[in-house]
Amino acid sequence: MTAPLLSIITVNYNNKSGLIKTLNSIKNQENAFFEHIIIDANSTDGSTDEIQLYEKEVTYPLYWISEPDNGIYDGMNKGIKQAHGEYLFFLNSGDILANNTILQKIDLDGNKYIYGKILYILSEKDHRYITPSKTLDIVYLLKTALPHQACFIHHSLFQKQLYNTEYKIISDWIHTIESVIFAECSYKYIDITIAEVDGNGVSANQEKLMEERIRWIKNKFPKAILDALSELYEYRISELAPFIQPISQTKKFKKRIGKLLSFLLKINNLVSHKKRREQNRKEIWTPFN
């Protein structure tokens, strides 16, 4: 049986040296079934010259364009619209695949989110492995995020909604929460290091990242729900964790929590959306301090 087609999407803007590393990483993949889509934001540093050379060297399907855009997620959305694959994988300029056979090892088995580990490169001497949780829930995802360089996302999850371009750093995190928690899509963790990630990218700006997360959280959740989730998180990292963990990880518990959150969000949006927005403007409140 033929493996599902994978669409690799690369977004670039004036990062010629990083782009070269990324293109070589993809070009050197062995026995993998994929297409490559490159969205360049009208770079002026010679990036398009490298793409043209790359185009002459590869035998797999390639689409590329160079034009102005409205940020990284606008570029990703352009790539999604051009993709033919059953799964999408975002590997932007500066990031590289872990080795030349990594794509062979990924079983695209129908789960909507398939994700693994990354090696985060902060400097020549500072490398850190990022290992996501095998089990995803709202408490975990409000505190952290899945690295998009390690996620193979089913194309169907973008049919109703693309990445939110209102946010500049966190839209892939929003997509994960809306897909995995709100829509309850299937997911699977694989114990494989997928990519080496440039730690100096846009998302490395932790202050801006947290500002955007807090803005989205305040707009999405009533404060009462977040206070409860914050308490759950505190319990999870406390000495009571060994007793709480077995209960909180059961399918029944997660299903009930997901339904309760969805119900409360709907009620909140219907009854107190305007009041809550006015209250948020007046309060100085940071969830999950």
Image: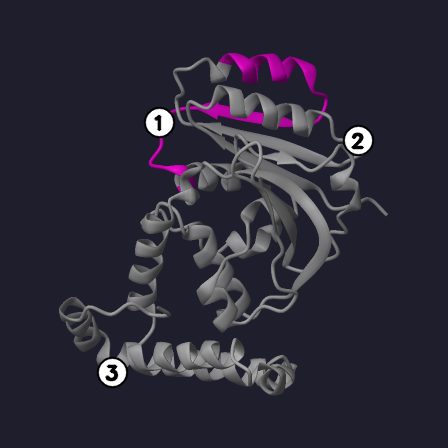
Magenta range is 49-73
34 horizontally vs 74: left or right: right
- The C terminus - image quarter: bottom left
Give the residue pinned by disc 3: 271
Give the residue pinned by disc 2: 30
Residue 240 or residue 181, whichever sits in front: 240
Badge nearest the viewer, 2 or 1: 2
Q: Secondary structure at mark 1?
A: loop
Quadrant of the rendered image containing residue 56: top right
How far apart, in angstroms, are the residues tagged by discs 2 and 1? 33 Å
How far apart, in angstroms, are the residues tagged by discs 3 and 1? 41 Å
The residue lying furthest to the front in this view is 125
Sequence-earlier tag: 2 or 1:
2
69 horizontally vs 79: left or right: left
Give the residue pinned by disc 1: 68
Q: Which amino acid, by three-letter code, is at mark 2?
A: Glu
